[in-house]
């Protein structure tokens, strides 16, 4: 077992390093995303977010491992400055589920690319 510089234990897991899960924060924020190399944007909404990724909904079907460009539709402060300094991130789809009836919607997990 390895130890990261923060002291958290990690263990190899099928070619990946398993690290303690990042803290999720419930957060409902509109977002737009597009597949890497595409021009058209699609709408979605975050469910929760962490420093390593996000869970979000969309009406469009995405495949596992799709690479996305995600931009968060942030509000602006009264002086016109954005609330977030950097609101666009690169991400990779790592999970896809369909919510149960009656609220059927696609839910995706995506990890941020560093």
Image (spheres, rainbow, N blue to C red):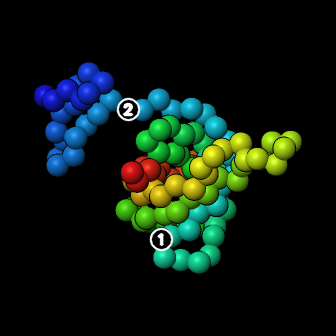
Quadrant housing residue 13: top left
65, above or below 47, in the image: below
What whole-number distance in Å separates the C-alpha atoms at marks 2 and 1? Answer: 26 Å
Residue drawn at point x = 81 percent, y = 42 percent: 77
**Which of the 4 image quarters holds residue 20?**
top left
The residue positioned 53% from the left and 46% from the top of the image is 55
Mark 1 closeness class: few <14, some 14–19, many ≥20 residues within 10 Å: some
| Residue name at image x 13 percent, y 28 percent | 1
Q: Secondary structure at mark 1?
A: loop
Identify the element where label 2 is drawn. loop
Q: Residue furthest left?
A: 1
Report the side of 2 relative to 84 (left or right).
left
Left or right position of 6 against 31: left
Residue assigned mark 1: 36
Q: Nearer the viewer, mark 2 or mark 1?
A: 1
Where residue 76 sits: x, y (%)? 79, 47
Relative height, residue 72 to residue 17 (above, below): below
Residue 107 percent across, percent down from the top left: 54, 52
Going from the N terminus, do you reach mark 2 or mark 1 first? 2
C-beta proximity under 8 Å, tags 2 and 1: no
Instruction: Read off the residue under disc 2.
Output: 21
**Residue 19 x/y as whole percent:** 29, 33
Q: Nearer the viewer, residue 72 or 79?
A: 79
């Amino acid at each position: 077992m390895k130890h990261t510089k923060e002291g958290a234990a990690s263990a190899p897991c099928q070619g990946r390093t398993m690290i303690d899960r990042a803290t999720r924060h419930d957060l409902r924020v509109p977002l737009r995303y597009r597949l890497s190399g595409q021009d058209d944007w699609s709408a979605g909404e975050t469910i929760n977010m962490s420093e390593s990724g996000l869970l979000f909904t969309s009406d469009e079907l995405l495949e596992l491992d799709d690479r996305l460009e995600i931009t968060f539709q942030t509000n602006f402060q009264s002086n016109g400055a954005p609330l977030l300094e950097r609101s666009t991130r690169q991400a990779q789809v790592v999970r896809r589920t369909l919510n149960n009836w009656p609220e059927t919607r696609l839910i995706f997990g995506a990890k941020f690319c560093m």
